[in-house]
Amino acid sequence: MNKQFDKPKIERAVRMILEAIGEDPDRDGLRDTPARVARVYAEIVGGGDTDPRHALRTSFKEDHHEIVLVKDIAFYSMCEHHLLPFFGKAHVGYIPNGKIVGISKLARVVEAFARRPQVQERMTSQIADLIEEMLGAEGVAVVIEGIHTCMTMRGVKKPGATVITSAMRGDFRKRITSRTEIMALIYGKSMSA
């Protein structure tokens, strides 16, 4: 739990919001809403102080120099601009340079960066940069597909729109063949077709 996380303060703020929109926070259906919202925020952004480096601290020597990919890692985050959820899936791949990590650790890195107020573009880069730094990988590829409720239910109101961001490091940035291979593995088809 985030050391700065203050459930009673969130409850007071939600109560004020309910009053500000003309609702009676003491009516039957809303009486427990401030506490419920505080629990939701604790769950969605309560991991903001989790150090994603911790997930990658244990590595193993392995003479493998081909792509390792974990795809379809589900994530839920909170848009820092509107405090509305965005969610989707992350695809995280790397080319080891003599050391590997347990594959669940890549999902833990995604989770750690998602559990804070965030923007998808930054989250994508943060994941790639950390894996490159901690593993000294020959290449890192991160592709995130997100649905943003701040865009689907308000403003432009375009449900069904997906935001795709990518961050390519090392071989995936320098070599089109490596980039083509990782994208084919992610999307299940040849990118040249």
Image (cartoon, helix red, strand yellow):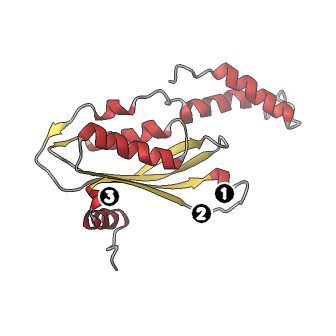
* Residue 73 can be seen in this image: yes
Residue placed under numbered mark 1 in the picture: 152
User: At label 2, which amino acid type do we have?
Assistant: Ala
Residue 161's disc is 2
Residue in front for this viewpoint, 46 or 163: 163
Which of these two is toward me, 4 or 165?
A: 165
Vertical placement of residue 163 versus 73, above or below:
below
Q: Residue furthest front?
A: 174
Image location (x, y in percent) of residue 71: 36, 55
Q: Which residue is mark 3?
A: 173
Residue 27 badge: none
Q: Are marks 2 and 1 in contact (CB under 8 Å)?
A: yes
Q: Which one is earlier in the sequence, the residue at label 2 or at label 1?
A: 1
Of the numbered discs 1 and 3, the one sitting upstream in the chain is 1
Quarter holding residue 158: bottom right
Residue that protrudes farthest toward the left in the picture? 63
In space, the residues marked 2 and 3 are separated at their CA atoms by: 27 Å
Instruction: Give the residue drawn at x 65%, y 62%.
Output: 159
Element marked by disc 1: helix
Determine whether, in the image, residue 26 is placed left or right of residue 60.
right
Q: Residues within 10 Å of mark 1 (few under 14, many from 20)?
A: some
Q: Position of residue 137 (x, y in %)?
A: 24, 46
Decide: is 117 above or below 178.
Answer: above
Answer left or right for 146 relative to 188.
Answer: right
User: Under tag 2, what secondary structure?
Assistant: loop
Residue ID at (74%, 30%): 14
Q: Is residue 33 left or right of residue 23?
A: left
